[in-house]
Every structure is written in C-alpha cells, then in structure tokens.
Image (cartoon, rainbow, N blue to C red):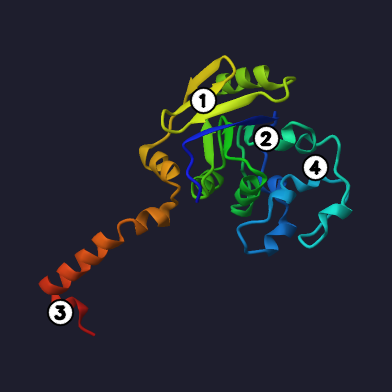
Amino acid sequence: MQPLTVHEGIIIPFNRTNIDTDMLLPKQYLKSLESSGFGAFLFDDERYLDPGEIDTPIASRRPNPACILNIPPYDRGSVVLAQANFGCGSSREHAVWALRDFGIRVVIAPSFGDIFRNNCFNNGLLPLQLEQEKIDTLFARVEGSPGVKACVDVRERSLRVAELCFEFDLDEGRRQRLLQGLDEIGETLTYADQVKAYEERRKLAEPWVFRA
C-alpha cells in the first residue's frame, strides 16, 4: 500500500450530504473480487449517459458533460470535499477501491459512514473529518474556483487550501499506518518475529499446551 505523508491535489467539490456507497460504485460492479480496476466506474450512474456493466467497454459509453468528474481540471482531482455522512450505506469495500483507482487520496467531510471510514484507512485513503463550519468555509473558497488545491500533511495533521489552514484529529495508530503504507494486517506482520519468539519461549515453558 502506498504511504501517505504529504499529499497535494486538486479538490473535487461535492456539495451534498449522504453520498452513499452505491452512488460511489453501483452494485453491478461488485461481481469482481479484484481490488483494482474500478476507477472508471466511480460515480458511474452520474458519470455516463449510458448504463454499463463491468465488461461494457468504456469507449462505447457517452460521458455525461454535467458530471464534475468529466470536467477539467476536476477530472484530475485527488481530494474530494463533501458534506455529512459521506460513504453511508452498504459496507462494500469496492467503493473505496473505486476512489483510490480514480486517484483520490483524501476525502474531506464533517462525518463518514463508520465502515466506509475504516475501509479508507485500510486502503491508504485519509477520511479527513472537520467541523461543519470549516467545511462550509472550504466550500465557499473552492466552489467557482476550479483547480484549487489542498495540501494535506499527515505528519503534522494539517490541511492547507490557499490562504486557509486547519488542523485535524487523527489517532496515532492510524496516522502511523498511513505514513508507513500499512493496513491492520500489514502492521501485525511487522511483529512476526516477536510472535514467533514468544511461541518458542512458551513451548519451552509449557510444552504440554502444544502436545497433540
């Protein structure tokens, strides 16, 4: 997983509440168990004028010119700015995979769906939570100004957008995993030698526990 230390990218504003995981990636794309290849289907129902399946050639579908993801420079954006309850709905991890494959590294919102939030951390995305007042200030600065960038510093827990600067909360365990590019399993595997050493010591101290 790619580490996330400092990220700078164009902000894509979605000034809506309750953007759910079905909006992020519709159910027909859940047939694939691969964790990559979903970027072209992010916000699929809004992004194309023609319906599609996972095996429908993208070249055969007409882009919706009204969808922000089809409008430069937002089509090169890597930071999403949204309203409350982003990522609510079903627990599909595919929604996070679609964001990641599009190039999104940070989602900024006042609140997130709990499972979606955990899925973000386990896939190297930062769900950056700010108070509503700060979110409204960001929308006022960003909307109508295409190309405005955010600079997110995970090391310092800071967000800069033009002249605005905010600090955000991020627990130390998750911060370290983002900085090192680890999910929870990857972090556990860093202790493999210590676990093995403990097991060997216990076999010597309590051999009866390990008898078949």
User: Counting residues from the N terminus, which is met first, the one under dot 2 or under dot 4?
Assistant: 4
- Residue 90 against residue 79 in the figure, above or below: below
Can residue 171 be seen here? The reply is yes
Give residue 76's mark: none
Contact, mark 2 vs mark 3 (Cβ under 8 Å): no
Quickly name the residue at label 4. 46
Q: What residue is shown at x 65% (from left), y 29% (from top)? A: 11
The answer for how far apart the CA atoms under marks 1 and 3 are is 55 Å
Q: As drawn, is 179 to the left or to the right of 100?
A: left
Q: As drawn, is 193 to the left or to the right of 85?
A: left
Quickly name the residue at label 2. 77
Contact, mark 2 vs mark 4 (Cβ under 8 Å): no
The answer for how far apart the CA atoms under marks 4 and 3 are is 62 Å
Q: Amino acid at mark 2?
A: Gly
Give the SS element for disc 2.
loop
Q: What residue is shown at x 12% (from left), y 73% (from top)? A: 204
Q: Amino acid at mark 4?
A: Glu
Q: Quadrant of the C terminus?
A: bottom left
